[in-house]
Amino acid sequence: MENLIGEYFRCYIPCFCIRKCAQLSMIMEGQKVGWIMVLFAIHSIPFVASQCKGEINVSSTNMTFLNESSIGTTLPSDVCKLNASGNFIMEITTDLFCKDPSSCLPNFYFLEELDLSNNQIQNIEDNAFDTLVHLKFLDISGNDLTMLKSIWFSKFILLEVLNASRNHIIHIENGVFTKHLSHLLQVNLAWNELNSFEPWAYIPDSVKTFDLRHNRITSFTNNLKWTYDLKESYDTYVDLRYNLLTEWDDFYVQQYSRSPDSDYAADFVTMLIDIRENNISCDCKIHYLVTRIQRSYYRYSNMEMFKVKCHSPPKLNNRDLFYDNGVVDDLICDLKNDCPIGCVCEGRPEANVTFINCSNSNLQKLPDKIPKNNYKTIQMYLDNNDISILDDRYYIGEISILSLAGNSLTSIKGDAISRMDALEKLNVNNNKLKSLPKSIQFQLPYEKINITRNPISCDCSMTWMRDWITLSPWDTTHRDIKCHHDDSKSDYKITDITEDMLSCSYDMAIALAVSLGIFLIVCIIAAVWAKRCPYETKVLLYRFLRIHPRDKYIVDREEDIEGDLYVSFDETDIHIRQWVLRELTKKLEKEKPRYNVFIPYRDLMGRAGEDKSEVIIEQMEKSKRVMIILSEGYEKNEWCTYECSRAELIDFNAGRVIFIEFYPEVAQMINQEPWNSRVQGRKILKRGETKSQKRWFWYKLKYELPVK
């Protein structure tokens, strides 16, 4: 039997003698071996050691067609190399490299290098390369090809180098670069006409360099449906220099990420994509990528591919995008949609503001619409217009700086001021205001507002301004502002105004009686409520009066502990993960008061190389509270179990560890050991299902957190 199989290999591999092999197959079938062994022999062919010996060089011989006659009849046996470069060949057919071995020259079966460069090849027949199973080097550069077909490469399992540069390639079929090219090291597709980047380079595991210089690439796409699923960085260098990339979009890399929460900036770095020598517009769209690299250890790697230069705007021309610290402040975008006529609207991600300048624009009211605000606050400058009323707008609560100097303001609406929770500075200098809403004193201290050059009237409704101004620092500008008294035709410093001076009188007895009655009723209701619901009473006192009726824990008085909250949860539970990354972070990090929250799933991504257990211990010891979000999968997660045990070790005083009952089913788990002992005496908060329950949950959680 061994002799028959050996004879089959000897007949098939060197000479493709089909008839003799078929006869041997029939003999083997007669001995109950069958086609299984035959197929095994056939599929083993590509892995037979190369026996090539010769080389054929027909370069620059003016040939127009590549076949046996154009090459010549006297051929060395077992050819290794074929060089047909520098000719006028327009098509590669199956005449020489064909699918049927019985009609081909057997000499090319062991061919390892094929050079067809600098011809005029426009087409390659589908099966032209089917028998070149040992090919390692293929050069089809300098031709007129417009696409790469997957069928051309289907048999190239040993291919190491592909050079298809200097063609007119505009399309690459999805099946060209697949896992079967397991030996592919170098790909050169420079000087073609590709208009988008696909992740071709990352599918074969062996690729080291993928050259896409001098194409027409303007964007990144993912028609291959490839996802970044590596645990270690790639070793594939992708050269995208000298293309038409003018704008960056974070989606370019995000579309390859397996999870929307992954650190796509780190993905970009480890994918080794070189975007130098492109006319990159340095604006807000690339801000996250730049700051992420500038503020990480990547910037110290001194990698050449990070030396990207800005092309525009002119202010940033030729500045180092990833190494110049001053660049980030100027990474801004012009916001065109909904920007009022005559205004300048910009997105400034480094300051996290939407900047709007409508000065000298002939406005008669606050803009009805402004660009969609993707940033934390709005800075709005409306100086030198004809605006008469500062009233409410849908965006009013996001304004941090508002300047209305040199307008015709006669009124500031109290409801508008009451909604301006983000307001930090207000300039209403040089207007026609005779009074201010009393609610303004609760939104801004006097030193943060400019009300000079307004005809403020001295009357009983403005006496509150005296204390408001008096509480400002002594060096506050315009602390000596005056109001005008119509009766006396005189001006008085507001800080000197009194009720007696203005002859203000009130029916104090009635007011006092009514106030006292209301106060007593409120006290009775509060006492009954406090007796029945003591914990909820404390929560409400803190929620509405900022009174925390208990001493701070010892850990709250330790100044070297900077963190407020460490969050431990089962990261594999998508519902809990989304709740933590979206709702919890929004409530605790973005809304006032803001807490310093450490979430291992999010914050450990940028600390690759560090011992995770040591980081957990360090961050937990630096946090004044530890939140443990209980779920059925929590006790099955090894890291969660580790975090819980560490939390118990540092919980020197009651209250430092907070348990969250995320699902109703967790109640059954808590009633069983070991959780029953762990949670005994500690606070357990239920997230709840209804709006009221969820609202109470947030009140209680903020009560349990460190006092801000």
Image (cartoon, rainbow, N blue to C red):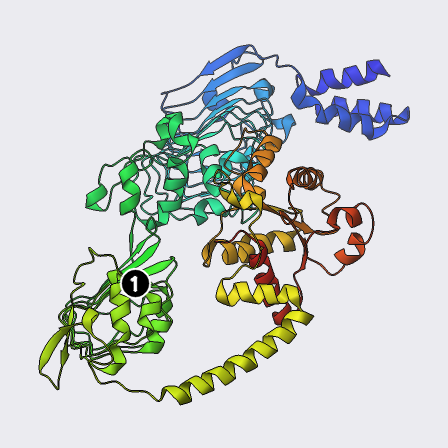
Image spot of residue 8 (x, y percent) = 76, 19
Instruction: Say which residue appears at 75% left-offset and 43% top-offset.
Output: 636
Whether residue 379 sits left or right of residue 680 in the image: it is left
Residue 497, quarter of picture: bottom left
Residue pushed farthest left?
A: 489
- Amino acid type, label 1: Pro
Question: How many dots with numbers?
Answer: 1
Q: Residues within 10 Å of mark 1 (few under 14, many from 20)?
A: some
Relative height, residue 329 to residue 130 (above, below): below
* Depth check, front residue: 436 or 257: 436
Whether residue 631 sits left or right of residue 562 in the image: it is right
Which residue is denoted by mark 1 in the rendering?
Answer: 445
Instruction: Say which residue appears at 75% left-offset and 56% top-offset.
Output: 666
Determine if residue 258 is in view.
Answer: no
Image spot of residue 590 (x, y percent) = 46, 56
| Helix, strand or loop status at disc 1 | loop
Image spot of residue 653 (x, y percent) = 64, 44
Determine if residue 462 is in view.
Answer: yes
Instruction: Say which residue appears at 14% left-offset and 69% top-offset.
Output: 384
Residue pushed farthest top?
A: 53
Image spot of residue 517 (x, y percent) = 51, 85
Relative height, residue 542 to residue 40 (above, below): below
User: Which image quarter holds the N terminus?
Assistant: top right
Instruction: Say which residue appears at 81% left-offset and 25% top-offset.
Output: 37
* Depth check, front residue: 490 or 125: 490
* Depth check, front residue: 156 or 474: 474
Residue 143, quarter of picture: top left
* Depth check, front residue: 26 or 525: 525
